[in-house]
Amino acid sequence: MVYEPLKSFTRRYLTYAQQWILPPTCISCGGNGNHSLNGVVLDLCSACYTQLPFNRCACTVCGLPLPESSPALYCGQCLHHPPPHHAGFCAFTYRYPVSDLIRPFKYGHQLACARLLGELLAQYLQHKHATPWPECIIPVPLHRKRYHIRGYNQTIELARFLHQRLNIPVRLDVLKRLKNTPEQAGLSRDERLKNLRQAFVINDVAIPDHVAILDDVITTGSTVHEVAAILNKAGAQRIEVWSVARAS
Ligand SMILES: [Zn+2]
Ligand SMILES: [Zn+2]
């Protein structure tokens, strides 16, 4: 387990307590959150649910959105330069209103979004994931300094929720972030790759054969690519990448 600052721990449990006491509210528009999806009431209204940009047609390896009704299984990049991971599942394209749910979740302590986004990702995976589940989920870690400034890692919060819903263990002991890399937003693909070189290290623990790397948003894929490469080198045989959203 990771050490969690007391402030963040208290905030998280107050948020969860509040969710039980207060009626569900749509996190997107503030109205009544009563949209039911496969028997689960979401913190989302029906009008906002219909606006969700589901990633229906996507590259099966990296999750990149493909044109609607495209018969292709892979994007051009994965076809010509296969990445070190083998399957990708990204529930949404990174567009409104999902982008407006992820930003406050990531930077604004809106931890209630973990339940909503986690539920939507869990249901997407249950619908799309036809092969056996991975043996564990490995959330992309934040650097220690950034974790303490933010007080939480939104990807670990998502992983906790997926563990509850899918009963897959979460491993926080596998991967460590060595470099406190600047935010990747706004950098070119080459700059991102340079930025991430040797940013992660594998701890001295046994690596399961089949793992899922979890990130909240995949933009160019550089981060999951880097993590998959070192997991691959450490002996993982089948590596999946999971995320709530994928930039197109
Ligand atoms: Zn709404
Ligand atoms: Zn691809």
Image (cartoon, rainbow, N blue to C red):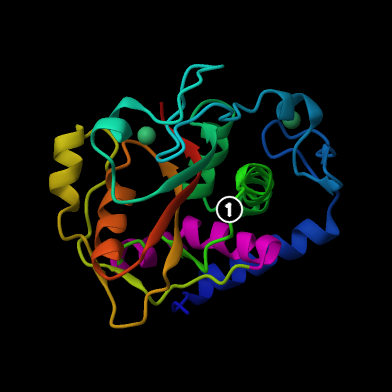
Query: What kind of element bears circle 1?
Result: loop
Q: Quadrant of residue 9?
A: bottom right
Residue at (48%, 56%) from the top-left corner? 155
State ligand 1's quadrant.
Answer: top right
Residue type beneath disc 1:
Thr
Secondary structure mostly taken by the magenta-highlighted segment of the chain? helix
Q: Is mark 1 within 8 Å of ligand 2?
A: no
In-image side of 140 versus 77 (left or right): right
Residue 143 pos. (x, y %): 30, 64
Image quarter hosting the C terminus: top left
In-image side of 170 versus 177 (left or right): right
Residue 60 pos. (x, y %): 46, 37
Residue at (60%, 67%) from the top-left corner? 168
Q: Disc 1 marks which residue?
A: 131
In this picture, which residue range is highlighted in magenta? 144-167
Q: Is residue 161 magenta?
A: yes
Q: Total number of numbered labels?
A: 1
Residue at (30%, 57%) from the top-left corner? 227
Residue 183 pos. (x, y %): 27, 45
* As drawn, 31 above or below 225: above
The one of 238 and 32 positioned closer to us in this rendering:
238
The one of 72 and 176 positioned closer to us in this rendering:
72
Residue 46 pos. (x, y %): 80, 29
